[in-house]
Amino acid sequence: MNFEDMDKAWNQALEEFFAQAGLKPRQIVVLGCSTSEVMGQHIGKASSEEVAEALLPALLAKVRARELYLAIQACEHLNRALVVEEACVEQYGLDAVTVVPSLLAGGSMAVKAWQSYQAPMMVETIRGHAGIDVGDTFIGMHLRPVVVPIRPSIKSIGHAHLTMARTRPRLIGGPRAMYPVV
């Protein structure tokens, strides 16, 4: 794995994501990331602390600079619960759950988030405003409707497939309704 190339691709992808996501301060970005898939292994089978340490700081810096919240999805063993800052729990009235992510139940990215956050907490559900999925971890359950794909020029991080999305309010009202450009 060439970490220099991965870092370059990741930073380019993040620039494109934030340029297209249209996020406002205190909104939520969801990250699902299989470090196993980044390394070319099957999801959940080769969790890599090295990959988490390479990817999370750049994203966290960009999120904090924009005054956003970052919710990091843990693995299936924790029902895809998310690591968030306590301030996010308080602002959005989220229900915290009691668990600490580990390499075998949560994954490397959730562990790294737990170590990096000022006041980490776990929640089972959230309604994020945009999301990044590295390695087909399927973050859709944690995004608000309506999900709109972001098409980055970067298609993978390491060996992992990369997808990104933003959300928009539902369009309602039928044929007589008028809508702003969204």
Image (cartoon, grey):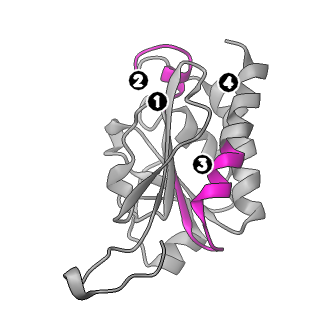
- Identify the mark nearer the N-term, 3 or 4: 4
Q: Amino acid at mark 1?
A: Gly
Please give the residue where the numbered disc 2 appears in the rendered image: 43
Quarter of the image where the N terminus is located: top right
Residue carrying label 3:
114
Mark closer to the observer (2, 1): 1
Discs 2, 1 touching: Cβ within 8 Å:
yes
Magenta highlight range: 14-43
Disc 3 element: helix
Across and down, in percent, residue 76 comes to 33, 38
Count neighbours of disc 4 (C-alpha within 10 A) and say few if under 14, some if 14 to 19, many if 20 or more.
few
Disc 1 crowd, CA 10 A, few/some/many (<14, 14-19, 20+): many
Residue position marked by numbered label 4 in the rendering: 50
Q: Is residue 75 magenta?
A: no
Q: CA distance from mark 1 to mark 4?
A: 16 Å
Front position in the image: 67 or 81: 67
**Residue at the (55%, 32%) spot, across then down:** 108
Q: Residue 48's quadrant in the figure? A: top right
Q: CA distance from mark 3 to mark 4?
A: 15 Å
Q: Which numbered disc, 2 or 1, marks the residue that appears first in the sequence? A: 2
Secondary element type, mark 1 = loop
The one of 39 and 146 positioned closer to us in this rendering: 146
Disc 4 versus disc 2: distance between alpha carbons? 16 Å
Location of residue 24 (image quadrant): bottom right
Q: Which residue is mark 1?
A: 135
Which percent across, then down, holds residue 27? Answer: 57, 70
Determine the residue positioned at 35% across, 43% down. 78
